[in-house]
Image (cartoon, rainbow, N blue to C red):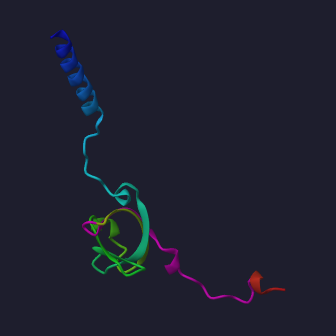
Amino acid sequence: MRTVILGTIATMMISGCLLAQEKPETPKQETSALKPLMVSGKVSDAGKTLTTDIDSVWTVSNPEVLRGHDGRLVKVKCYVDTVKNRIQILSVRKDEAQSNYTAARYTDSAFRR
C-alpha cells in the first residue's frame, strides 16, 4: 500500500515538472514587425500613402509625420505590418535621388588636364 501511494505521488510530481517546462503558446509576430526597415518611395499628394519603387502601396498609420513631404521621394525608417498593409513611420529623410543637381562647368577641376 505504501509503495502505491509513493508511486502515485512520484508520478504526479514528474508530470507536474513536465508541465512546468512547457512554454505557453504566444501568438507569433512577424520578424519584420520587430525590426525597423528602411523603405524608399514617393509620398502621395494627400500624404496618407507611400508608393515604393516596386509599385507597392502602403497606408501610413501616422500620416502627420509625412506633413510637408507630399509628392516627394523620401526614405523612411518604419515598422511594417504586412497583415494590414500598413507602415508606422519612425523617421523621414529626403531621398538623395531627388536632390538638386547643378550643371557642369568647364572650369571645374574634373575637366582640366
Where's residue 43, x and y in %?
35, 77
Where's residue 69, x and y in %?
37, 74
Residue at the top extreme?
Answer: 2
Please state which of residues 53 and 6 is positioned toward the viewer in this rendering. Answer: 6
Please state which of residues 20 and 113 is positioned toward the viewer in this rendering. Answer: 20
Side of 17 where 95 appears, left or right: right
The residue lying at 37 percent from left, 54 percent from top is: 34
Instruction: Tell me how many marks there are.
Output: 0
Where's residue 90, x and y in %?
37, 60
The residue lying at 25 percent from left, 33 percent from top is: 19
Please state which of residues 7 and 84 is positioned toward the viewer in this rendering. Answer: 7
Q: Is residue 4 above or below residue 37?
A: above
Does the stretch in magenta take in 102?
yes
Q: Is residue 7 above or below residue 42?
A: above
Q: Is residue 37 above or below residue 98?
A: above
Side of 70 where 113 appears, left or right: right
Quadrant of residue 12 within the rendered picture: top left
Q: Looking at the figure, which quarter contains the C terminus?
A: bottom right
Where's residue 48, x and y in %?
27, 73
Residue at the left extreme?
Answer: 1
The residue lying at 15 percent from left, 11 percent from top is: 1
The residue lying at 77 percent from left, 81 percent from top is: 109
The magenta stretch is 83-108
